[in-house]
């Protein structure tokens, strides 16, 4: 049975946050605030681990954060769920990334960890520079082993053996192709869909009361799972079969447009 109160789940990059100007449009801020004033619950549901959520916190106020593709769920400062890759497995993952000639970022709750020396992967180094610019640089590098991480991503080119790395991971991790040689690696039991279920259980809400907003391939699990799926104007085509509403780009007030049309505000 559905209720008047809905739970809204937003991806960050390309959905709530513009990848053109790296900001949340005023229209999206206004729409989120209005939805919460109407009694709805609003959550970030991101591939970013908690260490990378900080910048969005200052831009829009929400009720909770589903981080790292479902590996950590926080509502009203309460940790509802958390998964961290076991330490010894994490050490082996680092070795395998190097063995198969990939670039990698280890994504933890407190920090993201990079190799001490810069790599040949331009996109990876841009992420490193952005993290350090935002003041979230880690005190440790790959060469240290005093930390754990929740998920990770790898970068591949013609010198890499991605197939060999995939075989080494086995069935423990889902490898999400984000395009341009960028792959997001998530523990197989967790996703943006499992995070939604954690939140809905806390509030005793039905799946029909969840609305998901996304644009990229790591949003696929929540699009496959949810009943109300809002797809941004610029998006990965893999999501189209599951979309129940097509909206505009985030820069073109796509969030506010969808929420008005769906009578959430």
Image: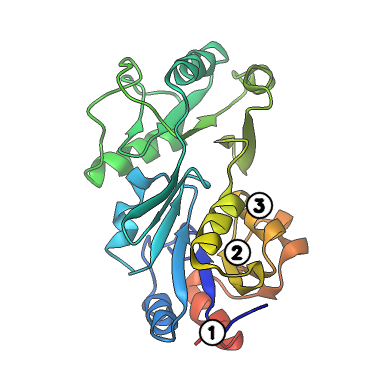
Could you tell me if residue 15 is visible in this image? no
Disc 3 vs disc 2: which is toward the camera? Answer: 3
Q: Secondary structure at mark 1?
A: loop
Which residue is found at the position 49% from the left and 81% from the top?
A: 256
Could you tell me if residue 91 is visible in this image? yes
Labels 3 and 2: the sequence-earlier one? 3
Q: Secondary structure at mark 3?
A: helix
Residue denoted by label 1:
264
Q: Position of residue 75 (x, y in %)?
A: 39, 59
Residue denoted by label 3:
221
Q: Quadrant of residue 88?
A: top left
**13 left or right, relative to 177:** left
**173 left or right, relative to 12:** right
Labels 3 & 2 near each other (Cβ < 8 A): no
Q: Quadrant of residue 148?
A: top left
The residue nearer to you, when weighing 132 against 21, is 132
Residue denoted by label 2:
234
Q: Residues within 10 Å of mark 3 (few under 14, many from 20)?
A: some
Residue 246 position (above or below residue 80): below
Which residue is found at the position 53% from the left and 46% from the top?
A: 69
Judging from the image, the colouring scheme is rainbow
Which residue is found at the position 27% from the left and 63% from the top?
A: 58
Which residue is found at the position 38% from the left and 85% from the top?
A: 37
Residue 80 position (above or below residue 106): below
Task: Quadrant for the N terminus, please.
Answer: bottom right
């Amino acid at each position: 049975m559905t209720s008047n109160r809905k739970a809204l789940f937003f991806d960050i990059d390309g959905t709530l946050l513009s990848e053109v100007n790296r900001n949340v449009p005023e229209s999206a801020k206004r729409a989120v605030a209005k939805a919460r004033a109407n009694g709805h619950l609003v959550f970030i549901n991101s591939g970013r681990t908690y260490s990378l959520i900080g910048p969005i916190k200052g831009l829009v106020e929400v009720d909770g954060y589903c981080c790292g593709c479902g590996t950590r769920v926080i509502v009203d400062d309460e940790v509802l769920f958390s998964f961290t890759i076991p330490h010894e497995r994490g050490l082996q993952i680092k070795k395998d990334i190097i063995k198969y000639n990939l670039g990698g970022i280890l994504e933890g709750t407190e920090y993201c960890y990079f190799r001490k020396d810069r790599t040949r992967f331009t996109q990876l180094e841009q992420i490193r520079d952005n993290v350090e610019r935002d003041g979230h640089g880690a005190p440790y590098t790959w060469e240290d082993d005093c930390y754990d991480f929740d998920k990770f991503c790898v970068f591949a080119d013609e010198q890499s053996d991605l197939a060999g790395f995939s075989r080494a991971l086995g069935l423990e991790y889902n490898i999400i192709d984000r395009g341009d040689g960028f792959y997001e690696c998530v523990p197989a039991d967790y996703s943006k869909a499992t995070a939604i279920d954690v939140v809905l259980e806390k509030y005793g809400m039905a799946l029909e009361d969840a609305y998901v907003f996304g644009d990229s391939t790591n949003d696929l699990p929540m699009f496959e799972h949810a009943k109300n799926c809002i797809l941004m104007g610029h998006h990965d085509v893999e999501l189209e079969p599951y979309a129940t509403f097509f909206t505009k780009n985030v820069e073109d007030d796509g969030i506010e447009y969808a929420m008005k049309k769906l009578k959430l505000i």
